[in-house]
Image (cartoon, rainbow, N blue to C red):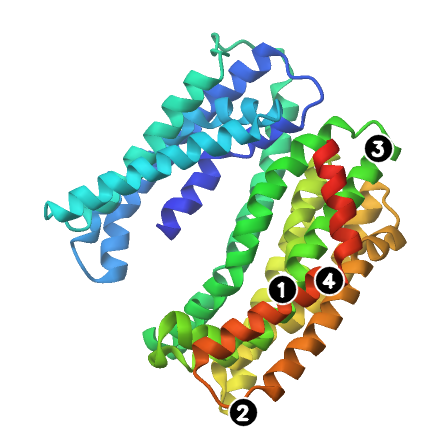
Amino acid sequence: MPLLLFFRLLAAAGLDVAAVQQARLDPRQASGLFWLNQLFGLVAAAVAVAAAPVLAWFYGTAAVLPVAAAMAGTLVVTALGVQHAALLQRRMRLDLLAGLRFCAHCVAGGAAIAAAAAGWGVWSLVVQQYVELGMVTLLVWFAEPWRPGRPVGGVGLRRLVRFGGHYTLSNLMFYVTTNVDKVVVGFALGETALGLYSQAFNLVMKPLHVLLTPLTGVMLPALSRLALEPAEYRRLLTGFFRLIALGMLPCGVGLALVAREAILVLGGPQWEPAGPILGVLAAALLVQGFFNAFGSVFASAGRVDRLAAASVVIAATLTVAFVVGLVVGQWAGWPLLGVAGAYSATMLVVIFPPYLVYCLRSVGYPLRGFFAAAAPAAAATAVMAMAVLAWRLAMPPTSPGRLLAGQVAVGLVVFAAAARAELRELYALLRNR
């Protein structure tokens, strides 16, 4: 799957983002992007099939080969629906798009369970992928009335392809940054250490998937429509920053405070060594939400060239940091904490501050505006942290589950009370808009 996701990035080629970002999209341009996606999907599928024997050799089992070859076909299925989904996103039909994907996800899950119950083994997961991606493609074709015409030249496709190329490069670099640490851990420390680290990392990423995935889906088309209206662009971007701060700052601090209990409750005693790793990684959530959203900010302003350049520097910096963290951690006797600490410290201190300035200057947004947008959530998060710590110290010895429930309840109530004015104002804005 990691290799397949890599090929999906190449097959999409950022052309869906190019379609969403354009202030005006000619139907001939949309058709050209559609046929380019089909070409890239076919090429990516062919390369994925050719890579199947290499994967079987790498994992040391022949069973990987037919599965990898079969999964390559999903690249073609995905390519068929990329532009239709982009057009729905462009028209801000995000509720409809989310509903279609949710329906496909549920049906595919049921199909996978049925196939597994019938004894299909790993092929039930292949069934799941084809059913989900196939349903998404069929449903977006049904929901979006546009149909591709024959490809023609002279419609400005080169500019759109260049835009997509820059965006794809940035995606590939950020793909590296989210996977190179696991490669380093697995290679140097083995599968048990990789399991502990991956479990903690996946838990840290959950809040990002829940909040940032739908939010960035809204940010790109909404900000793109206002790219030529600086005042309205800044106002909307401020709102997005406020939302991210309200979601990510309490998640980062809260998860760091309850890391041990969360791991014990969710994974059981065998996962307890992952608790400190989770606590260290959670610190990165303080900036990770903004970091992920900056891709949509760059793209909305058409500055994906700057995004691509920054992504290369960030990928190189994090790769070096992981290796250094591993070496220092091994010297100190805590190699996994060394890698986790390298990630959080590098994101907080080395990468985010200059990346923040670089992004905001690229779109003409004042730095003080960013801090003003995040300040109310930061203050409420500090109050929440003190309340949770006080509750933790006051509670008598109890089970991890009760301790976790108490801390979460106190954190939610105190944060909601401390941030009530900000929450009320944002709710009113969302309801009116």
Marks 2 and 1, the one that precedes in the sequence: 2
Marks 2 and 3, the one that precedes in the sequence: 3
Residue annotated with mark 2? 332
Query: In the image, residue 426 lies at what x, y percent?
Result: 75, 45
Query: In the image, residue 102 lies at what x, y percent?
Result: 42, 37
Residue at disc 3, secondary structure: helix
Compared across the picture, whether 74 is left or right of 415 comes to: left
Instruction: Check if mark 2's residue and mark 3's residue have beta carbons within 8 Å.
Output: no
Please tell me which residue lies in front, 82 or 119. Answer: 119
Amino acid, disc 1? Leu
Query: In the image, residue 198 lies at what x, y percent?
Result: 43, 67
Question: What's the distance in space between the residues labelled 3 and 4, CA to CA?
Answer: 30 Å
Marks 1 and 4, the one that precedes in the sequence: 1
Q: Is residue 186 visible?
A: no
Marks 3 and 1, the one that precedes in the sequence: 3
Marks 4 and 2, the one that precedes in the sequence: 2
Residue annotated with mark 4? 417
Residue annotated with mark 1? 412
Q: Quadrant of the C terminus?
A: top right
Amino acid, disc 3? Glu
Compared across the picture, whether 182 is left or right of 306 comes to: left
Compared across the picture, whether 296 is left or right of 258 comes to: right
Question: What's the distance in space between the residues labelled 2 and 1, CA to CA?
Answer: 36 Å
